[in-house]
Image (cartoon, rainbow, N blue to C red):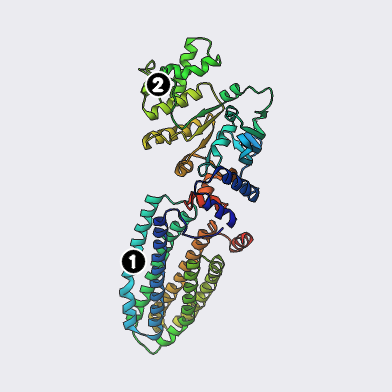
Amino acid sequence: MEMNTTQHTSQQYNHELENARSRLMTMGGLVEAQVDNAIKALLEGDSALGEKVAFSDYEINTLEVAIDEQCAEIIARRQPAASDLRLLITIIKVITDLERIGDEAEKVGRYAVEMPETATSGELHRSLRHLGEHVKAMLRDTLDALARMDVKLAMQVVDKDQQVDAEFDAVSRQLFTRMLEDPRNIKDSLSVTWCARSLERIGDHCKNICEYVIYLVKGKDVRHTNLEKVRSEILSNN
Amino acid sequence: MTEAVLNMTEANAPPSRESAAGKREEFAHEISNTVGRPLLSDAATKFRCRDVDVFYAGDKQAIFNVSMDIGRNEVIAMIGPSGCGKSTFLRCLNRMNDTIPGCRVTGDIHLDSEDIHARAQDPVLLRARVGMVFQKPNPFPKSIYDNVAYGPRLHGLAANRAELDDIVEDSLTKAGLFNEVKDRLSAPGTGLSGGQQQRLCIARTIAVSPEVILMDEPTSALDPIATATIEELIDELRQSFTICIVTHSMQQAARISQRTAYFHLGKLVEVNDTKTVFTNPQHQLTENYITGRFG
C-alpha cells in the first residue's frame, strides 16, 4: 500500500503532518551532526569540538519536547487513523530514541574533553575508529530509511546492529586484555570502554528506529521478534 | 487500483445519475473481492449474505455482489461515503427495501438457517426478529408506555396487562430509560428530549424481543452526551442481540464495533476487525477513506 502524508481533503491536515515529519528530520540531522562531531572530537583529541557537542545537546532536547507537543495536538484535533496514526506513533517513538542518541553523543563529547592526552590515549581511541565509522554509517542509513520510508534499508540496518554488537565485544576484549597487562591502564581503558558502550547503544537506538519504520510502512510490530521470521514476512508481502 | 482512486476523486463532485451509475459498474468490475475477514464460521454466524445485488427502479444497480457474514452478539459497523450503499445493504437485512417501489434484491440472505426471501417468510415477522432504529428519533404520537407496548400488542406477546407492564418496564430498563420516565409513562413520547426519544425507539425495538437490531445512523441527530449514552447502551445490548450499525462517524465505528465493513460505490471493499481497519487497513480505498483523503 502506498505511504504518503499528503492528499487529505484537509490541506491544513496535510500541512500539519508534513510539518511534524520535517521537524523529525531536522532533529535527525542535528543528532547526526552531534554524533559525527563527538566521534571526530574523540578520535582527533579535539577537546574544543567535544565541548561544543556537550553544550549543543539542549537543541535536540528542546526539539523533542516541541515535536511531542505538536503530535499530541494533532492527535487531539484530528483523531488520526491508519497510516496517519502510525506516522504519529512512529514520530513520538523515534524522537525518544533520537534524543537518547543525542545523550550518548554528549557523553562521548564530554569524554573527549575530560580525557587527558596521554601517550597511550591516541592508540586506545584508534580502536574505536572502526566501531565509530560503523555506527555513523548505521545512523545515516537509519535517517535515510526514515525519510524515504524504506523498509528494505531499515531491515539492513536492523541486521547491521548485530555486527556493531560483535565489534563492541571485540573492542571490550581488547581493553580487558590491556587492563590485565598493566593495572595502570585501568582508568583509561575503562573510559574508552564507556565510549565504546555509548557507540554500541547508538547502534541499538538506530535498530529501534528502523523497527518503527517497518511498523510505519507495514503496520507490523517487529520488536522483540525473530529476525528471520520478520524478514520472510516482510519480503513475502513485498 | 490507481484508476479506481482517480475515479473516486472525480466522484467527489455530485455526478449526474447516469454517470454515477456508469462509474459504479466500472468500479464494481475493478474490485471483485472483498478483502479482510468478511466470512465467519457457521457457529458464529447470525446473518449469512452471499452475492447480494440491489437494483433500484430502472435497473440502476446500487449494490454489487456483496458477500459477508454478520456474527452473533457482535456489533458490526458499516462505513463509507454517502451513496456507497451501506444503508441500502442494511435495509436488505429485514427486507425494508421491499417497501420501495421498483427495488429488487437478488442473492442469498440467511438469518440463522432461514432464507429471508423464502416464499413462506412473512416480512412482518422478519422485522420483529430484525428490528430497526432510524436516524431521526420517531416515537409514535402516543404515550411512552404505548410506544413500547405497541409491538408486543401487535404480535400478541403479552397474555395480560401485568405481562405487558413487565415487557414495557424491562425494555425501558434495557434501553437505559426507565429511571428517567418511570413517573410519567403516560406522558407523550414526543415530549422527551432527542436522546431520550432515541432510547425510547430502541426500547420499542427491543420490546418485541428481536434477535438483530439494525441502526441507521442512530446518533447523528444527538448531542455528544446523548450519543455516549446510546453507545454505552449498544455495548450492553450486544450481550443479547446482534447489532448492525450504519454510521458516518468513523470514531463511533471505532469506539463501538468489533468488526467494520467499508462500502464504496456499491461494493463491499473490506471487512475486518475494527482494530485492524483503524490501525492497518488492508485496502487502499479503506485507508484513503478513514484517513480523510477524499469524500
Which percent across, then down, holds residue B197?
A: 41, 26
Q: Mark 1 falls on what kind of element?
A: helix
Which percent across, then down, holds residue B239?
A: 52, 31
Q: Quadrant of residue A73?
A: bottom left
Q: Is residue A89 above or below residue B187?
A: below
Q: Which of the chains bears the disc numbered 2? A: B
Image disc number at residue A61? 1
Q: Relative to residue A224, is residue A37 drawn left or right?
A: left
Q: Relative to residue B78, is residue B181 drawn left or right?
A: left
Image disc number at residue A137? none
Closer to us: B77 or A152 = B77
Which percent across, then down, holds residue B51?
A: 67, 39
Which percent across, then down, holds residue B69?
A: 62, 38
Q: For the residue marked with disc 2, what is the amino acid? A: Gly
Residue occupied by mark 2: B189
Q: Quadrant of residue B233?
A: top left
Q: Which of the chains bears the disc numbered 1? A: A
